[in-house]
Image (spheres, rainbow, N blue to C red):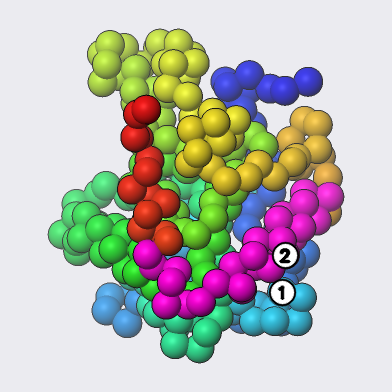
Amino acid sequence: MPLNIMQRVDLLKSLGRPTIRDYIPLLFKEFTEFHGDRYYSDDPALLGGVGFFDDKPITVIAQVRGHDIEDLKRINFSMPHPEGYRKALRLVKQAEKFHRPVLCFIDTPGAFCGVGAEERGQGEAIARNLYEFMMVKTPVMSIVLGEGGSGGALAIGVSDELAMMENALYSVISPKGFASILWKDGSREREAAEMIKITADDLKSFGICDAIIAEPEGGASKDVNLTANNIAAWVRATLGRLSKETPENLPEKRYQKYRKFGVHK
């Protein structure tokens, strides 16, 4: 039976839900993690590296979730700093240079909004990624693993094809934040969640999400191997389609895809 939206919110916040570090050994061979943005520092909230998928190299960029309080503190509760987004951009440019496809995993409540992040240009880093990801001449795929929150998710979400896990959510704001702004009452979170249409089914119907990746009944944690196999099947099929595209044509097709969002007929 499909979960209602608040059950999905609870599921995504569960510390038992699989994270990118659980999926990497199931999806890739010889994964090598890269560190640092070459400007300021490394950001553990955003992982990047190169792995082998079906014996072919692929650049992986992923927001990191935790399984316990120490994990959560180390990764700043999955809220990347600007150096995380700059690291992601560095790896995308590297992928373009070496003709590697890019696979992004979105899983964040949003970018960190602390004073330090703002001083180091959080808004600029996100905006730069939106622009550069749109223009890169190599295939880019994105998967919303769990929460896809605001600009923090969009910064690695511009892609040729975007998939969502069955129980994932993708939104400009959390239901609680929405209720706090619209009604000045965060306790109306459940009411807001039903209104703002942020499930995979909703976004598929809007044409924003291209595919929904199935999860076992009760969520991905019930069978991580099966979930990883479902992710791999989508990546394999999508790579097959995108590999037929001429690299020079990808930016224009990507641009036209995003220009259609929000158009009413």
In which quarter of the view is residue 4 placed?
A: top right
Q: Amino acid at mark 1?
A: Phe
Residue 18: in sight, yes or no? yes
Residue 201 lies, with reference to residue 45, above or below; the image says above
Does dot 2 land on a helix, a strand or a loop? helix
Instruction: Between residue 67 and residue 251, name the one nearer to us.
Output: 251
Q: Position of residue 214 (x, y in %)?
A: 74, 41
Tell me the distance, in whole angstroms, between the alpha carbons under discs 1 and 2: 9 Å
Q: Which mark is residue 53?
A: 1
Quadrant placement of the C terminus? top left
Q: Position of residue 128 (x, y in %)?
A: 26, 64
Give the mark nearest the N terminus, 1 or 2: 1
Which residue does the numbered mark 2 point to in the structure image? 236
In which quarter of the view is residue 242 placed?
A: bottom right
In which quarter of the view is residue 146 placed?
A: top right
Q: Position of residue 43 (x, y in %)?
A: 41, 66
